[in-house]
Each structure stands twice: as structure tokens, then as C-alpha cells.
Amino acid sequence: MDYSYAKATEHSCPHCHQTTTADIWLIVDQAARPELVQKIINGELNSLMCPNCGQSIGEIDRPLLVYRPSEQPPLLFSPARKTAIAEDQAHNVQALVKRLLDEIGNEDDDWVMEGLKRVHRSQLAAMLSSDSKFES
């Protein structure tokens, strides 16, 4: 089962000013969606191109939770880069973990806080690419 989650959001192109809707990934299930993990490694996840003019809209800065059921730690949380308030970052991680746990249906959630690691976005690709199944 795939526990990944994307939220449709509207964005305005800085070049042609057209509004477009795109799915922005907030939870990535490493086991079910290795192509999304590869996009994280390549720095391409949540990077958008305008369907109207073809120009880059850029990376959409959102928090990201990576679920790695067969790895330690099983959860990697990377806050949005521009979020400066600690309470906001804590709220984001709690909301994403709650959504994941609701989907998994696992009532034993003790592993979550023990297995949650906060990772700066600049370090996330290196951490994911060190997983053996994603090495070249």
C-alpha cells in the first residue's frame, strides 16, 4: 500500500502570471514510491514548470515527511526552508505524522517519536541516497 500524500495547490507563474494547480508532495512512502525518492535525491520534488509558458515556477517550499518502513529511522522530517517559527514546524510534523498514522492504522505509535529524525532539506538527498537500494 502507498502511504504517500500530495495536496493540490494553486501557484502563479512568475513569468506569465497564469495560475496553475499542481500536486505538492508532503508525505513520500519510500517503499511504494521510489521514483519520488529519486526526485528528492535529484532536487526535483515539488519543482514546477508552468504548463502555459513552459518556464520554471521553481520549487514549492513545503514540509516533507519521508516514510521508510524498512530503514532506521523510519521517519525523516524535513521542514519547509522558509519556516522560521518553531511552533509552526512542530505543527507541520505533528499533522503529517498524524495523517500517516491514520492511513497506516497502527494504534501502537510508540515507534514514531523514537523513529523520527529531523533533517535539513540540504541533507535529505544525501541521507536518502545512502540507502542501499538507491545507490547507483
Image (cartoon, rainbow, N blue to C red):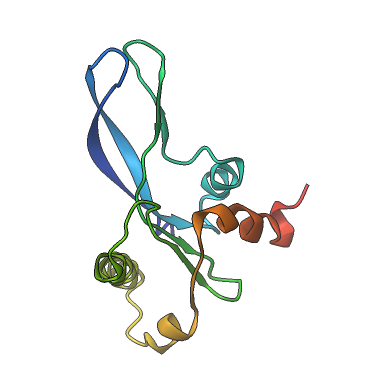
48 vs 9: above or below: above
Q: Quadrant of residue 13?
A: top left
Q: Quadrant of residue 23?
A: top left
Foreground residue among 8 and 59: 59
83 vs 68: above or below: above
- The x and y percentages for residue 78 are 44, 60
Q: Is residue 98 left or right of residue 46?
A: left
Foreground residue among 126 and 51: 126
Q: If the image is split into quadrants, where does the N terminus sit?
A: bottom left
Foreground residue among 74 and 46: 46
- The x and y percentages for residue 83 are 32, 56
Q: Residue at x 32, y 85 (%)?
A: 107
Q: Residue at x 56, y 53 (%)?
A: 122
Q: Quadrant of residue 61?
A: top left
Q: Is residue 64 left or right of residue 95?
A: right
Q: Residue at x 25, y 71 (%)?
A: 87
Q: Residue at x 35, y 51 (%)?
A: 82
Single out the residue that lies furthest toward the right: 136
Single out the residue that lies furthest toward the front: 84
11 vs 82: above or below: above
How many marks the image carries: the answer is: 0
Q: Is residue 98 left or right of residue 75?
A: left
- The x and y percentages for residue 71 are 61, 72
- The x and y percentages for residue 17 are 23, 17
